[in-house]
Amino acid sequence: MRRGRADHDQAGLQRVLLLGGVLTVLAGVGFAVWGLFGESRGLVIGVVLVVFGAACLVVSRDDGRGRWCPECLARNAEDATVCERCGHDLG
């Protein structure tokens, strides 16, 4: 049995993040509307939820592929041997 995550786990994680992001943004908009017409704390909670949901949506579009440079933390192509940003050998 292969160790680590299987390929289908990445797709499942992306789907969960996408769904969670959409639901969080919708909840944030609901809290913001409630904050406009009711209690003002809803404005703060709503904005925080919308920002968090938007971050989930952005992360859900990332496929997680590529090679990371240990020096500058830039992501490079999967077949790269040298970092495109700093020129460090990726080995």
Image (tube, rainbow, N blue to C red):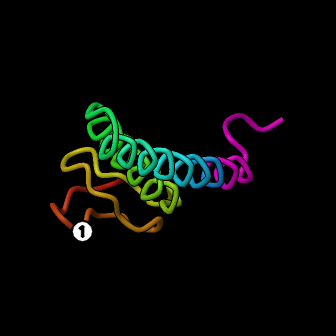
Q: Residue at x 33, y 48 (%)?
A: 51
Q: Is residue 4 left or right of residue 82?
A: right
Q: Nearer the viewer, residue 31 or 11?
A: 31
On the picture, is 7 further left or further right than 81?
right
Q: Quadrant of the N terminus?
A: top right
Q: Along the line of sight, which residue is nearer the eye, 32 or 50? A: 32
Residue at point 26%, 56% (across, down): 74
Q: Residue at x 70, y 50 (%)?
A: 12
- Expressed as whole percent of the image width and height from the top left, the position of residue 73 reads 25, 49
**In this view, 25 is above or below 43:** below
Q: From this view, report whether residue 78 is shown above or below residue 30.
A: below
Residue 35: name its quadrant: top left
Q: Residue at x 21, y 56 (%)?
A: 88
Structural crowding at the residue carrying mark 1, measured as other residues with C-alpha within 10 Å and reported as few (<14), some (14–19) or many (≥20): some
Q: Is residue 2 magenta?
A: yes
Residue lying at the far front of the rendered structure: 37
Seen in the image, is 76 located left or right of residue 10?
Answer: left
Q: Nearer the viewer, residue 52 or 74?
A: 52
> Residue 19: image x %, image y %?
62, 52
Q: Which residues are magenta?
A: 1-13
Q: Which residue is mark 1?
A: 84
Q: Position of residue 30 (x, y in %)?
A: 46, 47
* Quarter occupied by residue 76: bottom left
Is 60 one of the magenta-colored residues? Answer: no
Q: Residue furthest right?
A: 1
| Badge 1 element | loop
- Looking at the image, the residue that sits furthest to the left is 86
| Amino acid marked by disc 1 | Glu
